[in-house]
Amino acid sequence: MTEGMSLRERKKLQTRHRLLAAATALFAERGFDKVSVAEIAEAAEVSKMTVFNYFAGKEDLVLAPMEEHIGDVARAVRDRASGESVLAAVRGQFLACVERRDPSVGMSDAPVVLRVRRLIVETPALLTRAHAFSMRSFDLLAEALVEEGEEPAIARVVAAQLIGTRNALIQANQLRLLAGESADAVAPDAVALAERAFGLLADGLADFATRP
Amino acid sequence: MTEGMSLRERKKLQTRHRLLAAATALFAERGFDKVSVAEIAEAAEVSKMTVFNYFAGKEDLVLAPMEEHIGDVARAVRDRASGESVLAAVRGQFLACVERRDPSVGMSDAPVVLRVRRLIVETPALLTRAHAFSMRSFDLLAEALVEEGEEPAIARVVAAQLIGTRNALIQANQLRLLAGESADAVAPDAVALAERAFGLLADGLADFATRP
DNA sequence: CAAGAAAATGTACTGAGTCAGGAATTAATC
DNA sequence: GATTAATTCCTGACTCAGTACATTTTCTTG
């Protein structure tokens, strides 16, 4: 796992994991606002400043795992098959995530994930930052559409409709999982709701930017 | 203008305006991050604490004027005429704002408004807060739809599509006005783009929740 | 005008995030 | 294999936003 890495790189990864572990443990125990960065640093045996070297802000100690998924939608659109519309690509990517119970669409009922999820919805600062990620995801999708030759203004409109729909679906999933339902119980409804939601868009967007 | 107000209430309004004026002047001069709350307080001849008595945070010294428009879309939907769909209500409210060159849809080219707008897009903290407002606006719209009897999950999907579309249109307007074009020059294109954007939604949403 | 309510302030504090410089790791050269 | 230069990493001292509380000023009302 760590072969081919210099001592420096291995230490960096270790420190990062120590920080994430210490932070999630403390946050789960007392809540996001009741834990100071200094305490996290101490628990991870590192100076406070080092925390900010590894993470841009306190919120990223919780949200870092999400950050890698920001480009997923835009990537799915770029990589879609010939003859597939943008909408079909976004719907397909979402449904695939639901099937594999991916946390990125709110479909994991693992206790750890649920605790983090609950922390996020209960903490305004985290909700805000999570929303900034969604904004970034919108930017990347709009950019992908522009690169296909769409007018920028229309690209942003369509991107907003698609990302907005997707976010609303994720929120619906999360509400039910946070209420205690199992991922397997929610999945069928999640699929059905997604079909309805994208169906609302489909009649207007069905032929939008279909690959030649 | 101030009739019927007690001396206390008048003074409060004065202080509020002094604070807003001092803040916008300083921000315009040196940028949001290069001005401290203490300086604003001093310029407005008030203690630093008083600033936080009037505004929840530094960002609100810039964004307070926007806050009152958060409920506009939800209100337009609630107050729509019999036989009018939700989409028509949102489109109508947007187009009316464009016609009257309302700053809330990015259609004012008044120098003061432009300076504030530029400050916002250049300052991450302000962008984030502005985005939180849009989130709130989404919540209110979804709530209004639920009160009409829609399923909550579908209500949020539709609200996200509508608010997302509207935000994308506002962004398009702002980009052009910030590039130096006049509001009167942009308005016709803004109307045309809005028709196209809502048209994309219309075929799927045209009959959604039409009033009986 | 006196009593009471509301708001402004001063002091003192917590905690997030920044900066310039110092310490450790690496790789290259001899 | 030691030395050094470059890079990367870490840290102590700081700034500034925002909070808590006790005190004082300012307005209202009987």
Image (cartoon, coloured by chain):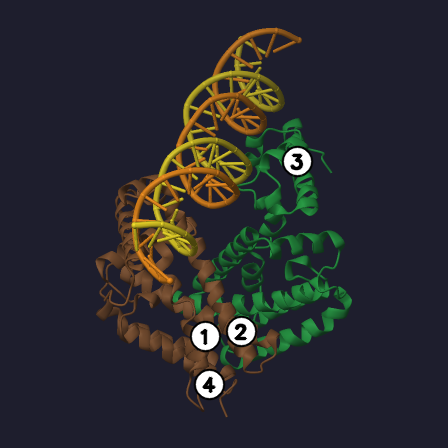
Chain colours: A green, B brown, C yellow, D orange
Chain label for disc 4: B
Q: Mark 2 points at which residue?
A: B143
Q: How crowded is mark 4: few (under 14 residues within 10 Å), some or many (20 or more)?
A: many
How much space separates mark 2 and mark 4, taking CA atoms? 16 Å
Q: Is residue A139 left or right of residue B40?
A: right
Q: Is residue A94 visible?
A: yes
In front of the other: B72 or A2: B72
What amino acid is found at the position of numbered circle 3 in the picture? Leu
In front of the other: B95 or D6: B95
Figure check: A43 above or below A180: above
Image location of residue A17, percent across then percent down: 68, 38
Dot 3 and dot 2 within a common chain: no
Displayed quadrant of residue B87 = bottom left
- Frontmost of labels 3 and 2 is 2
Q: Can residue A212 be seen in this view?
A: no
Q: Mark 1 points at which residue?
A: B74
The reply to whether the C-beta atoms of the residues labelled 1 and 2 are less than 8 Å apart is yes
Figure check: A167 above or below B16: below
Q: Which label's residue is closer to the chain start, 2 or 4?
A: 4
Displayed quadrant of residue D9 = top right
What amino acid is found at the position of numbered circle 4 in the picture? Ser
The reply to whether the C-beta atoms of the residues labelled 3 and 1 are less than 8 Å apart is no
Label 3 residue SS: helix
Figure check: A6 above or below A179: above
Chain label for disc 2: B
Q: Mark 3 points at which residue?
A: A13
Image location of residue A207, percent across then percent down: 51, 78
In front of the other: A9 or C20: C20
Q: Mark 4 points at which residue?
A: B85
In front of the other: A75 or A178: A178
Dot 4 and dot 3 within a common chain: no
